[in-house]
Image (spheres, helix red, strand yellow):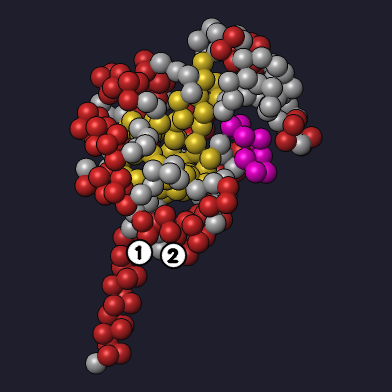
Amino acid sequence: MLRALCITLLLADTAVAQTHRVVAIAHRGEHLQHPENTIPAFEEAIRAGADFIEVDLRTTSDGKLVLSHDATVDRCTNGHGKIAEMTFTEVEALDAGVKAGSEFAGTRIPTFDQVLDLARGKIGIYVDTKSASAQDLAGHIDGHGMTDHVVIYCGAGLARQIQAINPRLKVMPESVSAERARTLVEQLHPKVMAFGGADFTPEIIGIVKQAGAAVYVDRQGSTDNPRDWQAAIDAGADGIQTDRPGPLVEYLRQKGYK
């Protein structure tokens, strides 16, 4: 009798794990072995089986959407200066790969259009909006047929503008605090909410879950490991942003979350 009960509980636990799907989000692509925010990094994330690539979006002085985490090109390229003060021609001429290794020499800063084309039919895009207008975001995403395959991390003001243009687009505000999460849920009714380490608490997670929104949490640095991935999942994470997409994907597959 006891043995039968144990088997039943084990099967129930397995069923729960198999029905709880968790998405793997490749932070700046696979950037530990490839230049961040570049096509090679995104191609490797696709090969590894990630569900989303995270991209940092900025606008050049002449209105072109390009990818860069930093406001300047200094850290990741052979150039200097602020992207907001550079033309697309100037940005396009930079080498965004040589600092990651001679094998990546000649890699360029990609445009948002190029990444949307690469991702279509292969992977979703998690847009970290550093500097871009709602109109540009909506126009490019819709124009590439990616409306249902993109989440947009941004502030509440920009989120409202995006929703006014196209309510189908998934805006993803940061939860920050319980009070802030309640306000965002009431005002934006988001389908997904972003979490860092500090705001990933049972109270805030509960608010977001009760609203029917998915929970995407960062797990980078010292928390980017199987123990902390599982802790995040146990706490309610529906998506994990990682610097190690290959190992995370393998872990999720082994545990039945993917």
Residue furthest bottom as drawn: 1
Q: Which residues are magenta?
A: 31-40
Residue 17: numbered disc: 1
Neighbourhood count class around disc 1 (C-alpha, 10 Å): few under 14, some 14–19, many 20 upward: some
Q: Position of residue 142 (x, y in %)?
A: 36, 24
Marks 1 and 2, the one that precedes in the sequence:
1
Q: Position of residue 219 (x, y in %)?
A: 50, 48
Q: Is residue 46 rendered magenta in the image?
A: no
Q: Main secondary structure of the magenta part?
A: loop
Q: Residue at x 30, y 18 (%)?
A: 161
Q: Position of residue 205 (x, y in %)?
A: 31, 48
- Asked if residue 164 is positioned above or below residue 207 in the image, the reply reads above
Please tell me whether mark 1 sits on a helix, a strand or a loop: helix
Residue furthest right as drawn: 102
Q: Position of residue 84 (x, y in %)?
A: 56, 12
Left or right side of 188 for 154: right
**Gap in angstroms between the C-alphas marked 1 and 2:** 7 Å
- Asked if residue 112 is positioned above or below residue 178 in the image, the reply reads above
Residue type pointed to by label 2: Lys
Instruction: Decide if residue 162 is in sight here.
Output: no
Q: Circle 2 is placed at which residue position?
A: 255
Q: Quadrant of the N terminus?
A: bottom left
